[in-house]
Image: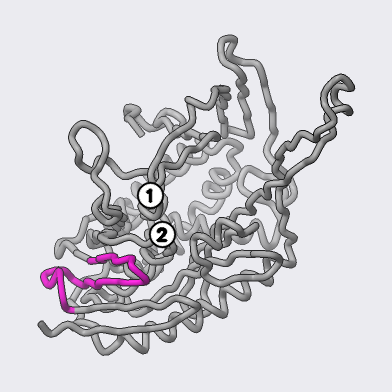
Amino acid sequence: MNEKIVELNVNHLNEQYTFDKIAKQSSGAVIYQSGKATLIAAVAVDPKPAGEDFLPLTVQYVEKSYAAAKIPGGFMKREGKPGDFETLTSRIVDRSLRPLFPKGFYYPVVITIMVVSSDSEVDMQVAALQAASAALFVSDLPVTQSVAAVRIGKIDGKTVINPKLSELAESTLDLYVVGSGEDLLMIEMRALASEKIDDIEMDIIDPMMPEAPIILEHQECNELGEAELIDLISVATGAIKEATQSYETAFRPFVREPLEFVLEDEKIDADLYHFIADQFKDDVNDAIMSMAKSERSTAFSKLKQKVIAAWEARGSEGDQVLVKRVLAEYKKSIVREMILDKEIRADGRGLDEVRPISIETGLLPSVHGSCLFTRGETQVLVTATLGDAKDAQLFDLITSRKSQSERFMVHYNFPGFSVGEAKPMSSP
């Protein structure tokens, strides 16, 4: 085999990247190792463009049970649909890598990341991002930048870069930052609660009880100030810049010969742009100032057809996609002008105004708690259900031998009718 191995120590991570060993028919692939954790990341591209004006990128992060020396549960003893952690990790990788593709690249791309060996101390979300980025960077796709993920923790008041999972469990902060060079691509953060022990003398509660103290436990939220957050993001930015420079220098010798892809021409037709600006400026302004989002959408759909008819009447070809793109570009310039020069937003609100808010509680008589929150046209129907210990959600993590439980669960549904789409609801 002509495998090529790169070993790096960046931001407290000992990493090994192996290229040209497996998945040789893919556009790019890597075996990533950190500790005992081993991930395979591979990139595949469809040579035929999708025919749509967007990048059809799919990211699949998959944890195999055998990676943790486990047999899958259930009757079939096979892995089922992705768990919450796998879905969230896939989205993190997608959001981080999507901006790297050039404009007009509309070819279907699938990035697959498989965890084939686990380590209870390795942060899989960091590992997955590093592996996927390396596979994409050395691939034959027109991507010339590398990205890096950094997780920042705060343990005993000290900032820790890329803590181990056992250290992260003791941290009061979980800040996950992804970037390329000096550019930030994604930030996720949560401040973790601290467990506090209370000693309460029993005679305070009941004078008839023994004098021995009772030990209670409560949680306190850890708040993070804006200035401190900015400083921590600055720390992450410096670490990311160092990492991406190291990755690009180390991986560049293994980059494959790029394939020839035809990028969709996203240049704006200057004649059509000026035609819209001259003939339909008032119509665009009226559509933008529509109070309701649905009204704006309807107004722009009608305006597009109006522009096409007028454009064709001049003897020009009224291409639907082109008119939509140019109209959107002109709309963007008008909205920007409104915000910067007139300090008003779409629907006429000032920069410091919010849409009307209303809250109705006790809406549903049979549930434990209910609320209808309305802000403008955005509505959320929320219900709360109280259960006992047996109702906790059980789940497994590939980095832990023990089953975990979650007592606080948030389920989110987005029915098609909420945005006027005619599509059925499906299982989550």
Q: Give the residue drawn at x 55%, y 26%.
A: 381
- What is the CA distance from the residue labelled 2 to the residue labelled 1? 9 Å
* Residue segment shown in magenta: 20-42
The answer, for residue 116, to whether it is visible in the render is yes
Q: Give the residue drawn at x 44%, y 60%.
A: 275
Looking at this view, is 111 or 157 the one in front?
157
Q: Secondary structure at mark 2?
A: loop
Q: Determine whether 413 is above or below 250 in the image.
A: above
Is residue 34 a member of the stretch shown in magenta? yes
Looking at this view, is 150 or 92 the one in front?
150
Q: Determine whether 354 is above or below 270 in the image.
A: above
Q: Residues within 10 Å of mark 2 (few under 14, many from 20)?
A: some
Q: Quadrant of the C terminus?
A: top left
Q: Which residue is mark 2?
A: 120
| Count of residue discs | 2
Q: In the rendered structure, are the residues bearing label 2 and label 1 in contact, judged by CB atoms less than 8 Å apart?
A: yes
Q: Which residue is mark 1?
A: 401
Quarter location, residue 362: top right
Residue type at mark 1 is Arg
Q: Give the residue drawn at x 32%, y 57%.
A: 54
Residue 363 image point, x, y percent: 61, 15
Direction top: furthest residue? 365
Q: Is residue 291 left or right of residue 356?
A: left
Residue type at mark 2 is Ser
The answer, for residue 318, to whether it is visible in the render is no
Q: How is the image coloured?
A: one colour
Q: Give the residue drawn at x 34%, y 80%.
A: 144
